[in-house]
Image: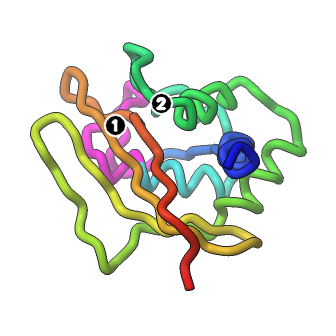
């Protein structure tokens, strides 16, 4: 499990998306997820800066992701892309919105096996942020 978390942490990058405002923050939960996936494909770790809970109440996985924002280690960028470059929103599971939280069901993947996961978002002052990442298991 720690290896999986480490691989995820080593793998986060995000590049501009439709929901990203000119301030660099996200007005929609789905845009945060799409940006996360785009980051894995592009290797632009600096985008992660605006994805995590500004109050710091997010879980270990998402905190570790945000810490990658200031890294420029080519191995981290490559590892992130290899692990998550082929991730996508799960078309069979609709997003769940409850007040100031959202749960987006995704399939995480790269060059290895694909995994079911849920990315939980939190809304703070009309902006959405990564809050939790829950890995459910491998896709069969």
Magenta stretch contains residue 25: yes
Name the residue rendered at 10%, 38% in the picture. Answer: 99
Instruction: Determine crowd level at label 2: few under 14, some 14-19, many 20+ residues with C-alpha closer than 10 A.
Output: some
The image quadrant that residue 74 belongs to is top right
Magenta stretch contains residue 77: no
Q: Considering the numbered disc 1 on the image, is that residue within a helix, a strand or a loop? A: loop
Colouring of the image: rainbow
- Give coordinates of residue 5: x percent, y percent: 66, 44
Identify the mark nearer the N-term, 2 or 1: 1
Question: Which of these two is toward me, 28 or 96?
Answer: 96
Q: Considering the numbered disc 2 on the image, is that residue within a helix, a strand or a loop? A: loop
Q: Is residue 55 above or below residue 67?
A: above
Q: Which residue is mark 2?
A: 59
Q: Is residue 89 above or below residue 38?
A: below
Name the residue rendered at 23%, 69% in the picture. Answer: 94
Q: Which residue is mark 1?
A: 26
Question: Is 126 positioned to the left or the right of 47 in the image?
Answer: left
User: Which dot, 2 or 1, sits closer to the camera?
Assistant: 2
Residue at the far front: name it.
1
- Give coordinates of residue 80: x percent, y percent: 73, 51
Question: Which of these two is toward me, 42 or 65?
Answer: 65
- Main SS category, magenta section: loop
- Give coordinates of residue 132: x percent, y percent: 42, 39
Residue at the far left: name it.
99
Name the residue rendered at 16%, 50% in the picture. Answer: 97
Instruction: Determine crowd level at label 1: few under 14, some 14-19, many 20+ residues with C-alpha closer than 10 A.
Output: many
- Give coordinates of residue 91: x percent, y percent: 34, 78
**Residue range of the region highlighted in magenta in the rendering:** 17-32
The image quadrant that residue 83 belongs to is bottom right
Q: Is residue 84 above or below residue 58?
A: below
Residue at the far bottom: name it.
140
């Amino acid at each position: 499990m720690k290896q999986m978390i480490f691989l995820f942490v080593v793998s986060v990058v995000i590049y501009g998306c439709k929901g990203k405002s000119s301030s660099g923050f996200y007005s929609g939960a789905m845009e945060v997820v799409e940006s996360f996936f785009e980051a894995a494909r592009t290797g632009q770790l600096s985008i992660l800066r605006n994805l995590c809970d500004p109050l710091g109440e997010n879980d270990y996985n998402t905190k570790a992701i945000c810490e990658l924002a200031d890294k420029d280690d080519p191995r981290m960028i490559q590892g992130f892309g290899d692990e998550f470059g082929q991730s996508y929103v799960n078309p069979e599971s609709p997003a769940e919105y409850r007040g100031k939280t959202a749960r987006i069901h995704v399939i995480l993947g790269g060059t290895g096996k694909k995994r079911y996961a849920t990315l939980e978002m939190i809304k703070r002052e009309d902006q959405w942020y990564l809050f939790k990442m829950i890995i459910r298991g491998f896709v069969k």
